[in-house]
Image (spheres, rainbow, N blue to C red):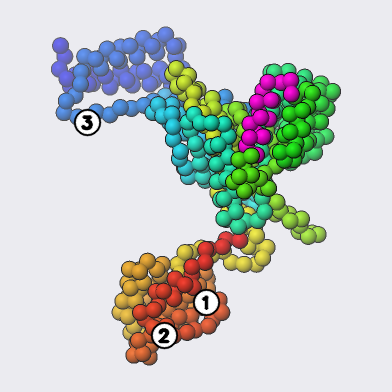
Amino acid sequence: MADRATLEELVRLQGERVRALKQQKAGAEQIEEEVAKLLKLKAQLGPDEGKQKFVLKTPKETLTGKYGEDSKLIYDLKDQGGELLSLRYDLTVPFARYLAMNKLTNIKRYHIAKVYRRDNPAMTRGRYREFYQCDFDIAGQFDPMIPDAECLKIMCEILSSLQIGDFLVKVNDRRILDGTFAVCGVPDSKFRTICSSVDKLDKVSWEEVKSEMVGEKGLAPEVADRVGDYVQQHGGVSLVEQLLQDPKLSQNKQALEGLGDLKLLFEYLTLFGIADKISFDLSLARGLDYYTGVIYEAVLLQPPAQAGEEPLGVGSVAAGGRYDGLVGMFDPKGRKVPCVGLSIGVERIFSTVEQRLEALEEKVRTTETQVLVASAQKKLLEERLKLISELWDAGIKAELLYKKNPKLLNQLQYCEEAGIPLVAIVGEQELKDGVIKLRSVASREEVDVRREDLVEEIKRRTSQPLCIC
């Protein structure tokens, strides 16, 4: 039997041969034959007791077939062996894969990370090719609509606390959409593509949507008209009850299940105190193929622009829904884990905040610093360092300029530029009197505060939550 060094060299050479065949796109049988030789050599090599063992998982392309017509926005890549890979399009599909790989059936989590879209950037509308999303998901088998209602409650809490203006959350159900298409006569094979057209109703008129359905997607005009009669409706729980009595929809099992769940959802949303923020909108389609039940999307209600002004708007700022079948796509045995979640568009919200501040000619506060420790005369660095240490130890967010003898004017200008609301000024007279001069940057008002009371006074003045609107 060959010695270990010889076998390792043979394994290396055979591995290079396999990779070369893959790059050359050789026949499957030839590649399999060479892979078998490689495995045989590795078996002869045996375990290496002296080295740490690693378990390497080959990355697999998992995104295609889950985003409908949005699949064209996926960034496709290829590794050196020619295997198709992609940058992640969202955080939902990777989460579902994680559940399947780790055999998890019950989890609640949030995740903030970057995603990538091969899109046409529009900076003023918060549309980028690389951006952050914040996701929250609940996975597990629970009674209907309880976790779904919690997700909508969380969405409303987030958007309300950010104080970015009035918003509306549109809700629908994919089963209602599919049932509507069925009773209107849309062929099964066209459900997803017609769904994608309907989803454009928040951006273009019904006439344009109908033209796309008929002219580009081959739907009969009379069928498109019947679809239009339904998808142009929106309202609250009363519309749900009305459709439950609809002679056509009430005969469709899918639609009936979806409407029943939406009625229950509205009951829970009323108990959560957010029903006034929710609108049942039959045009909401959410083009992603993995949704199976309730879907929702939050949009900002922008005031009408003045004559000659560019209207503010970034479209949807949050969205989500139920995806009960996605985990099963990654499980070898097809085991399903019901899931529901939401995604917040971080950059879109930032764009809205920036536009509003620009419109109001206000500066964006870029720091959480509560106070700048400053000096009024020279040779007071030691006193500034003592004071800022006291503030840090008390949990105060404080800064100082990294200069021995900074001019007071420069220190005050730094506060104005950075948005620091308070200045704690150390001076020779203040040190003698046992006080610190506390200055409000906005009003320029100054008061002497006893040193032992300074922490509480700063906390009192900065206790209001930071408003970004």
Whether 69 is drawn above or below 313: the answer is above
Whether 18 is drawn above or below 417: the answer is above
Residue 172 makes an appearance in the image: yes
> What amino acid is at disc 2?
Ala
Q: Earlier in the sequence, mark 3 or mark 2?
A: 3
What residue is shown with label 3? Answer: 52
Q: Main secondary structure of the magenta part?
A: helix
Residue 169 or 211: which is nearer the viewer?
A: 169
Residue 260 falls within the magenta-colored stretch: yes
Whether 110 is drawn above or below 245: the answer is below
Q: Which mark is residue 441?
A: 1
Q: Are marks 1 and 2 in contact (CB under 8 Å)?
A: no
Residue 441 falls within the magenta-colored stretch: no
Residue 13: x and y in percent read: 29, 20
> What amino acid is at disc 1?
Val
Label 3 – label 2 distance at C-alpha:
61 Å
Label 1 – label 3 distance at C-alpha:
59 Å
